[in-house]
Image: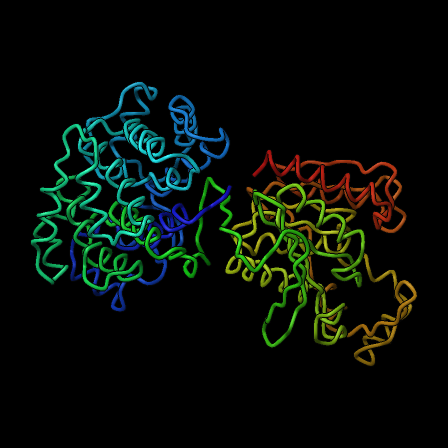
Amino acid sequence: MIMNKYLQAAVVSDALSLGPHWIYNQTKIARLYPDGIKNFADPGSAYHPGKSAGDLTHYGQQSMILAGSLETRGGFSVDGWREDWLEGMKDFSGYMDGASKETIASGGISASSSNDLAGSSRLAPVLDLGVSLDEKILAARAQTALTHGDSDVIDSAEFIVRAVIAIEGGADISGAFDQAAEEGNYNSLNAKDFLAIARSQGDDFLAVGQSLGLTCHFPEAFPLALYLALRPGANYASAISENGLAGGDTSARAMVLAVLFAARDGEVSKEYTSGLKTSGGSPVLPVPNTYKAGSNPVTLNYDGKVLAGVLEMPDGEVVATAIFAHCFTCGKDFLPGARVSRGLASRGIATLRIDFTGLGQSKGSFEDSSFITNVDELVYASEWLSSTLCPPTLLVGHSLGGAAVLAAAAKIDTIKAVSTIGAPADPGHVTHMFEGDIEKIKLDGKAKVSLAGRPFVIGERFISDIENYDQKVVLGGLKGIHVLVMHAPDDDVVGIKNAGDIYTALNHPKSFISLAGADHLLTKPEDAEYVAELIRVWAKRVL
């Protein structure tokens, strides 16, 4: 799912608001967050059981459902939005507000009478649509009206859209509010009165919050959101923090503030995206201008190491992000792995591949590397990708890299799917390539061995890590992650039995595809292309 400027800002603000959400005691909030609302935090109230830092509230989750509906259907459709919202909320396990419950009970036929600002606050994905102002207004009003029948709330959706477009056109926030109030075609909203209320308040935002009211009800939440946006010197960070410190229904107000400052200042929330969890969606952040379509060399600095990588970018829409792990001693530039990565990128999946320590252009000594360090480097690669482009949702690994991505999947919260290609069931399988040198490695701490005609120094750590590692336990512990096992029946390097052992040890959901006619290293270009297409089709379904 593409996560453009407005959706990104809105869901980050929702996640930042989770900590103080529905805490009305400002003294308690100040005690919990003495430095303000600057980081994701576990919920401080009892309303979000099971949620943790970085999660979304039910407001942010519904924005993700709306974004998915717009992307899947290529635009806004009233009937499509109803269908997608009902489907998205069907298995929702978090706190559910009254408006959602009433709408679900009616089968989406009639909205509740709720006057909560939440109904219009989730409109951010509409702002990212490449359509006219009138079309955005119609979509914003209709998405609100699905669950909230209050006329002021529906009108406020139009007000927010008009204000955002005015800011994009060069108006400051105050001027944009005046323009939206003047030009709106509202059924009941007296925007000028609410603006007058917001502008008449004092400098103490905590006292203003108490005075105006901190609930989600429109007569309280709407003027308070306007007030916080109009604060002298306000920006995204200060407004979200002050909103959270004020307390009450922090999320709905925050999501309105988010789109206003995103319109004025651009990508205001990118620095917060590391650790963001978007259950029910697979977000992709805007592609930085520094990354062009095709192969982009990148450098990752990790734990005193310098890892070289290549980020393969699609020529067009990014639908998912992935990390590819190469086979034992192969490196990121090994042609079959590069072909698979480029094939994934050509299908919309931005794919990062790295040289593990001591290989290719990565610094460090190969003798200090091991299966465990490979796994750790994949975890770091996911953190780098999260902060640079988007949290990865897919891992792909070839041969020993396949074993590594299975191990890394349990350590990366955002991973939803893993695909292996010719992977061994036991990472120790690779030691058969130098089994005559194992005793020497143990005695001397290292030994020079020949692998595929090239000399490598294997350290004792490599042996000890593998001997003490139980991959079956890891496989059995993977839950809720889709795994696709691909293996060539005639693989003479890693036998097909390994695929069976992996598949048996895994929990569902899992799939197996036979790569008939391929060799272990996928040396034929058509085999690498076939693998990329299989992963694309499978990933589209499971992600």
Q: Give the image location of residue 396, x and y in percent.
A: 68, 49
Front residue of 373/397: it is 397
Front residue of 127/119: it is 127
The relative height of residue 385 versus residue 366 in the rendered view (above or below) is: above
**Hey, which quadrant is residue 69 in on the image?**
top left
Question: Which residue is depicted at the point 63% across and 64% down?
Answer: 298
In this figure, which colouring scheme has been used for the structure?
Answer: rainbow
Q: Is residue 135 visible?
A: yes
From the viewer's perspective, is 176 left or right of 324?
left
Q: Give the image location of residue 517, x and y in percent.
A: 88, 38
**Hey, which quadrant is residue 44 in on the image?**
bottom left
Q: Give the image location of residue 201, x and y in percent.
A: 8, 55
From the viewer's perspective, is 136 left or right of 537?
left
The relative height of residue 299 versus residue 475 in the rendered view (above or below) is: below
Front residue of 341/329: it is 341
Q: Give the image location of residue 362, x and y in percent.
A: 70, 70
Task: Please identify the residue farthest to the front as the structure is shown.
Answer: 170
